[in-house]
Image (tube, rainbow, N blue to C red):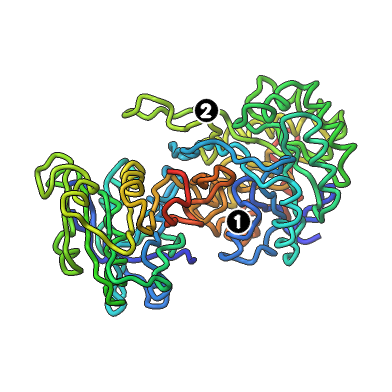
C-alpha cells in the first residue's frame, strides 16, 4: 500500500481525505476548483426518501472559529439523487459514500434499499442530524434505537454501513458499542454539537430553527476526545471529522484512532482545502516520524 | 469561478460605515464578470472567521485592472476588512452568482432602484445598460444624509433621485415614494436592497418586468451548502441565492 492509502470496508482509499457530508453537495460545485479524483472519497449530501425543502432562513450563523447550521436536510429525495446527482461523480476515480437520513426506521430502510440501484461504495447512516424535528438525532442518542436502525439498514443495504455518531450524548462509547454489536462496518464521528446564537438587536435566536449544529475548529478537541475514547472500545474503523482544516489536524485525528478523516466547514473557508491537505500530508507524516497513514492510526494512545 | 489573492489598491470611507475598496484583478478575470455578480471574501488569516463575506461588485476598470467593492461595516468581520490597507492582500472567490442578464433585454428606458448597500451593484449594471444606449433613471434610498454615496456617479448615467428615511437628504421616505412622487416609469426595473424594499418595489411595479437581487446569509457561496435558499413563489422548491441568484426575475421567488 502507498504511503497515504487506507483500506476500509468497501473503501479502497488512495488517501484518507474526504469532504464531509452536507458541506460538499454532490461534488459539482467544488469540481470547478480541482480534480475530484484527487480525493480519497466523497461523502455526499444526505438523502431522505422524499424531497425535503429544509428549514427557513437564516440557516447559518458564524461563531468564533466555527459556525452554526440548521439546513434541515434539504435534498431532492433519494431517487432524484440517484438519477440526477450521483452520475456526475462517476467520471472521477473515487468511491462515493452516500449519507442516509430519515424520520422513521422504515424511511431509513427504504432509502438504503433504493441505494442498491446506485454505484455507491458505502453508506453513512445519519442518526445524528440535530436540525430536523423528527428523526435524526433521537436515533443517535438511545443505544437501543441506534442499534435497531443500524440492524435494519444493514439488512436493507448492499454496501458497508458506517454509522455517524452524535456528540450530543452523555456516553458516546455506549452508542458506539451498541451499533458495532448491531453490525455496523464502521463509525463516522462526530456530527455537529448543538448550539445557539442570539441576535442582540432582535433579542431572538439568530437561526430560524433556534438551535443549530456547531462545526469548525471550535469543536475539534471534542471530536479528538470522543474518537480517542471510542477507538479503545470498538474494533471497527472510525472515519473522523470535526474542525479539520490542515494536515496537522489530520495527523491528530489519526493518532486519536481515526483511519480516515473528513473535512467539512473548512471547505467554505478554502474551497481547495481537501486538495491542499492531500498535498501536505506526506510531509507532515514524515515530519512527525511516520512512514504511512496506517502507521499513525491510534498511535496517540498511551499503550500504542 | 476562481480563488485568488488580490492586492488592495485603495480603501476609503465614502459614507457612514461605508467602505469603498479597490483591488487589483487581472483582465482575464474581469472580462468574465457580469453586473450583479459578487465576490466571496475571506476575513483574516486564522480560524476566527470561518465564513466568507459576500460583497457585490460595484464597478471594474479593465485598463487599470481594478475591481471596486463597496460594503458596509455591520460586524466584526466587515470591520476587520475595513481596516485593511493598500498593498495588503485579500483572498476571494470570483465571480460568484448569476448576475443580471442584460444581453437579451430590449428596452428604451429602465429604472435602477437601490437601497443602502444594495446600491453598489446597480452602478456597474447602469454602465453596461448605458453602453447599450438604454436610458437609465436611478432611484437610491438611504437611511439618512450621512449614508448617501455615489450620487454623482449615478448622475453621470442619467437622472438620479435620492430618498432618505428621515428626510435629511432628497425626498423623505422610501424609494417607492420617489416613484410615486415623480411618476417614474421604465420598460424594465432592476432592484437591489433589503427584502422589505424589494417587496414594496415588486408590488408597486407589478405591471413592469423586473429583476431583483437578494441578500441572504451565506455559507460556501458556491451552491454546495444550501444555507442561502429562497422559496419559489409556488412554494414547491428552493433556489440558492448564491448560485441560482442573487438576481431573480420579479415574482420568481417568495420574498
Q: Which residue is mark 2?
A: A211
Up/down of A261 relative to B95, above or below: above
**Number of the label disc, if any, that sits on residue A163:** none
Image marks 1 and 2: residues in contact by CB distance under 8 Å: no
Mark 1 crowdedness (10 Å alpha carbons): few <14, some 14-19, many ≥20? many
Q: Position of residue A164 (x, y in %)?
A: 72, 36
Compared across the picture, whether B84 is left or right of A97 comes to left
Up/down of A241 relative to A199, above or below: below
Compared across the picture, whether A294 is left or right of A69 comes to right
Mark 2: secondary structure: loop
Mark 2 crowdedness (10 Å alpha carbons): few <14, some 14-19, many ≥20? some
Q: Chain of mark 1?
A: A
Seen from the viewer's position, the closer of residues B80 and A205 is A205
Q: From the image, state whether disc 1 or disc 2 is nearer to you.
A: 2
Q: Residue furthest left?
A: B168
Q: Chain of mark 2?
A: A
Q: Residue at x 65, y 45 (%)?
A: A75
Q: Which residue is mark 1?
A: A274
Tell me, yes or no, if residue A143 can be seen here. yes
Mark 1: secondary structure: helix
Q: Which of disc 2 and disc 1 is earlier in sequence?
A: 2
Quarter of the image with the C terminus of chain A in it:
top right
Compared across the picture, whether A14 is left or right of B163 comes to right
Tell me, yes or no, if residue B14 can be seen here. no
Up/down of B227 relative to A196, above or below: below
Amino acid at each position: 500500500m502507498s504511503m497515504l492509502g487506507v483500506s476500509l470496508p468497501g473503501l479502497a482509499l488512495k488517501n484518507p481525505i474526504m469532504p464531509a457530508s452536507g458541506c460538499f453537495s454532490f461534488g459539482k460545485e467544488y469540481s470547478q476548483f480541482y480534480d475530484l479524483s484527487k480525493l480519497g472519497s466523497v461523502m455526499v449530501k444526505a438523502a431522505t426518501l422524499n424531497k425535503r425543502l429544509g428549514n427557513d432562513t437564516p440557516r447559518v450563523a458564524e461563531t468564533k472559529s466555527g459556525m452554526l447550521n440548521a439546513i434541515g436536510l434539504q435534498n431532492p429525495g433519494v431517487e432524484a439523487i440517484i438519477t440526477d446527482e450521483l452520475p456526475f461523480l462517476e467520471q472521477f476515480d473515487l468511491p462515493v459514500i452516500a449519507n442516509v437520513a430519515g424520520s422513521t426506521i422504515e424511511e431509513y430502510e427504504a432509502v438504503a434499499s433504493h441505494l442498491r440501484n446506485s454505484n455507491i461504495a458505502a453508506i453513512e447512516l445519519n442518526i445524528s442530524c440535530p436540525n430536523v424535528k423528527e428523526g435524526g438525532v433521537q436515533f443517535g442518542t438511545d443505544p437501543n434505537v441506534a442499534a435497531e436502525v443500524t440492524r435494519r439498514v444493514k439488512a436493507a443495504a448492499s454496501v458497508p454501513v458506517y454509522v455517524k455518531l452524535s456528540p450530543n450524548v452523555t456516553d458516546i462509547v455506549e452508542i458506539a458499542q451498541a451499533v458495532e454489536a448491531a453490525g455496523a462496518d464502521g463509525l463516522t464521528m462526530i456530527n455537529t454539537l448543538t448550539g445557539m446564537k442570539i441576535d442582540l438587536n432582535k433579542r431572538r435566536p439568530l437561526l430560524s430553527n433556534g438551535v443549530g449544529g456547531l462545526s469548525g475548529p471550535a469543536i475539534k478537541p471534542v471530536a479528538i476526545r470522543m474518537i480517542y475514547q471510542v477507538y479503545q472500545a470498538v474494533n471497527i474503523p472510525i472515519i473522523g471529522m470535526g474542525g479539520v482544516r490542515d494536515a496537522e489536524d489530520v495527523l491528530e485525528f489519526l493518532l486519536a484512532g481515526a483511519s480516515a478523516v473528513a473535512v467539512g466547514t473548512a471547505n467554505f473557508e478554502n474551497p481547495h482545502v481537501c486538495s491542499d491537505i492531500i498535498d501536505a500530508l506526506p510531509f507532515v507524516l514524515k515530519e512527525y516520524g511516520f512512514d504511512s497513514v496506517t502507521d499513525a492510526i491510534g498511535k496517540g494512545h498511551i499503550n500504542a | 469561478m476562481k480563488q485568488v489573492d488580490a492586492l488592495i489598491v485603495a480603501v476609503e470611507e465614502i459614507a457612514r460605515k461605508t467602505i469603498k475598496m479597490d483591488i487589483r484583478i487581472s483582465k482575464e478575470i474581469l472580462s468574465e464578470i457580469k453586473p450583479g455578480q459578487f465576490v466571496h471574501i475571506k476575513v483574516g488569516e486564522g480560524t476566527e472567521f470561518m465564513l466568507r463575506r459576500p460583497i457585490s461588485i460595484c464597478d471594474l476598470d479593465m485598463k487599470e485592472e481594478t475591481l471596486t467593492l463597496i460594503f458596509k461595516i455591520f460586524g466584526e468581520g466587515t470591520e476587520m476588512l475595513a481596516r485593511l490597507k493598500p498593498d495588503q492582500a485579500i483572498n476571494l472567490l470570483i465571480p460568484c452568482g448569476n448576475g443580471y442578464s442584460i444581453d437579451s433585454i430590449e428596452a428604451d428606458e429602465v429604472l435602477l432602484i437601490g437601497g443602502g448597500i444594495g446600491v453598489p451593484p446597480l452602478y456597474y449594471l447602469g454602465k453596461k445598460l448605458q453602453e447599450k444606449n438604454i436610458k437609465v433613471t436611478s432611484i437610491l434610498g438611504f437611511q439618512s444624509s450621512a449614508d448617501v454615496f455615489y450620487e454623482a456617479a449615478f448622475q453621470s448615467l442619467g437622472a438620479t433621485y435620492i430618498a432618505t428615511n428621515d428626510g435629511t437628504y432628497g425626498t423623505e421616505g422610501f424609494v417607492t415614494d420617489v416613484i410615486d412622487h415623480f411618476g417614474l416609469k421604465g420598460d424594465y426595473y432592476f432592484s437591489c436592497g433589503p427584502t422589505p424594499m424589494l417587496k414594496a418595489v415588486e408590488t408597486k411595479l407589478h405591471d413592469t418586468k423586473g429583476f431583483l437581487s437578494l441578500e441572504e446569509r451565506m455559507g460556501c457561496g458556491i451552491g454546495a451548502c444550501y444555507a442561502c435558499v429562497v422559496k419559489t413563489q409556488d412554494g414547491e422548491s428552493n433556489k440558492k441565492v448564491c448560485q441560482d441568484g442573487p438576481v431573480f426575475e420579479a415574482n420568481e421567488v417568495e420574498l
